Image (spheres, rainbow, N blue to C red):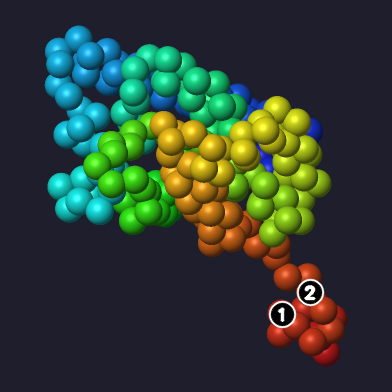
Amino acid sequence: MGGDPNRFGTEAFYAALGRAFVAMCAVVPFLFLIEALDQGLGFGLDVAAGIIPLRIQGLDGVFFSPFLHHGFDHLYSNSIPLILLGTFVLAAGTRRFLWSTLVIIVVSGLGVWFTGAPNSVVVGASGVIFGYLGILLTRGIVERSWWNFAVVLLVGLLYGWQLLGILPTDERISWQGHLFGLLGGIVAAILFRRRRPEPYGSNHPESPLSLP
C-alpha cells in the first residue's frame, strides 16, 4: 500500500503509524483493567508479582512488574508517554517491537533486581518507556535515517527532561529501572537495527557489471 512503510511521507508509512497508535491505545485500557482488579478485589499483585531486589521470590517480577502500578496516579503518568513512544517503535515493525520490548523488560528488570534498594517492591512501565526512548534515540544513529533523526528531535523536545529520571533524585522512584531500561533500549536498537542492502559494485559476485 503506497510504498515503503519505513519511508516518511508514503501512504504505507502513515498507515503503519496509525495502526501502531491504535494498538498502543488498546494496551493502556488493559493496564487499567489490571489495576482496577488489583485494587477492587484486593489481590495484592504489587507485592506478589513485583520486583523485590536480591530476593529469589521477587525475580519473577522482572516479567510481571511492567504490567503493574502503584495506584491509578502512577498509571496515568505512564500512559501518555507509553502510547506516544510505543507508537513510533511499533510503527517500524511488529516483530522488532516485540523482541525489543522483551530485551528492555529483561535488561531493566534484572538491573533493578541486582541494584535496587533491599526490601523495596518495584512495579510500573517506566523501565519500558525509557527503553523505547533509548530505541528512538539510538535508531537514528545506527540506521542513519532522517526520519529517525526527526523522531529523536520530537522525543527530545517532549520528553528530554525525563532523562533526569536515570539519576537517583527520589528514593520513591526506581531510577535503576529507568537507567537500565534506557540501556536495554540502546541494546535493542543495535541488535534489531534495519540493515541497508549493500549496493552492487564491480566486485560484487551478483553485480550486473561483472557479467561478461
Marks 2,1: beta carbons within 8 A: yes
- The local crowd at label 1, few if under 14, some if 14 to 19, many if 20 or more residues have their Cα within 10 Å, is few
The quadrant in which residue 11 appears is: top right
Mark 2 vs mark 1, CA separation in Å = 7 Å
Residue for point 20% across, 51% down? 55
Q: Please tell me whether mark 2 sits on a helix, a strand or a loop.
A: loop
Q: Horizontal placement of 4 versus 208: left or right?
A: left
* N-terminal label among 2 and 1: 2
Tell me residue 30's x, y (percent): 34, 21
Q: Horizontal placement of 16 versus 48: left or right?
A: right
Residue 58 vs residue 168, the one in the foreground: 168
Residue for point 79% across, 74% down? 200
Q: Horizontal placement of 84 versus 117: left or right?
A: right
Quarter of the image containing the C terminus?
A: bottom right
The relative height of residue 134 versus residue 199 in the rendered view (above or below) is above
Residue for point 73% across, 56% down? 141
Which amino acid type is shown beneath numbered disc 1? Answer: Glu
Residue lying farthest to the top in this orientation: 40
Asked whether residue 80 is in view, the answer is yes
- Report which residue position mark 1 lands on: 206
Asked whether residue 7 is in view, the answer is no
- Report which residue position mark 2 lands on: 200
Tell me residue 90's x, y (percent): 54, 38
Residue for point 50% across, 20% down? 77
Give the foreground label among 2 and 1: 2
Residue lying farthest to the bottom in this orientation: 212
Tell me residue 113's x, y (percent): 32, 51
